[in-house]
Image: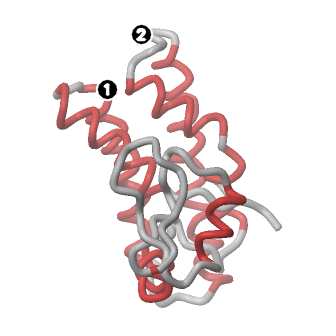
Amino acid sequence: MREAACWAHLRRDFHDVWKGTNSPIAREALDWIGALYDIERTITGASAKQRVAVRQRDSRPRVEAFKAWCEAQLRRIPGKGELAKAMRYALNRWPAFTLFLEDGRMPIDNNLLERDIRIFVKQVSLCTPYSSVCKHWKRTRISSATRAALPGHRSFDRL
């Protein structure tokens, strides 16, 4: 098994920084990611073999340039800011973010999957900041779990 990271989540990190600070660097990151989504729209419905061919030809050079751009920007911006955090998130998980380039069956993001599983997990959030992967797994097995009302409270109400 290999991790496939979600470009929509990465995009959201940059979007939040741009909305909050009007950062031109965050805006440029959004443009880089938007170009990848433009390519993905052109191959919607294509076979996995066709998708991987287009991704290798069109997306891979952009993805590699985006990585180099992020590395260069990290040397210029404050290291503790949210923008640097978003870039480090991408760079630290780079193999997971580039898996879609190698496998035409993999989507660029997991938005479709998240919408599909929403009916099964209902009120349970699979992406809370306080939970480990093991706790996420346990949550999907608790049929009546609800999110804790108080921040920092880590247990689940079982009805």
Q: Is 37 located above or below residue 28 in the figure?
A: below
The kind of residue on which mark 2 rests is Pro
| Residue 147 x/y as whole percent | 41, 63
Q: Nearer the viewer, residue 92 or 49?
A: 92
Which residue occupies 45% across, 65% down?
A: 125
Q: For the residues marked 2 and 1, what is the alpha-carbon distance in whole angstroms? A: 12 Å
Q: Residue furthest right?
A: 1
Which residue occupies 72% across, 65% down?
A: 102
Q: Nearer the viewer, residue 140 or 82?
A: 140
Which residue occupies 39% across, 63% down?
A: 37
| Residue 116 x/y as whole percent | 46, 86
Q: Quadrant of the N terminus?
A: bottom right
Give yes or no for contact between labels 2 and 1 (Cβ–Cβ under 8 Å). Answer: no
Label placed on residue 134 = none
Which residue occupies 48% across, 53% down?
A: 128
The image quarter in which residue 56 lies: bottom right
Q: Is 119 located above or below residue 149 in the figure?
A: below
Label placed on residue 25 = 1
Which mark lies nearer to you, 2 or 1? 2
Q: Earlier in the sequence, mark 2 or mark 1?
A: 1
Q: Is residue 44 left or right of residue 34?
A: right
* Label 1: few (<14), some (14–19) or many (≥20) C-alpha neighbours in 10 Å: some
The image quarter in which residue 80 lies: top left
Determine the secondary structure under disc 2: loop
Label placed on residue 78 = 2
Q: Nearer the viewer, residue 74 or 37?
A: 74
Q: Residue furthest front?
A: 159
Q: Nearer the viewer, residue 148 or 128?
A: 148
Q: Is residue 12 left or right of residue 144?
A: left
The kind of residue on which mark 1 rests is Ile
Determine the secondary structure under disc 1: helix
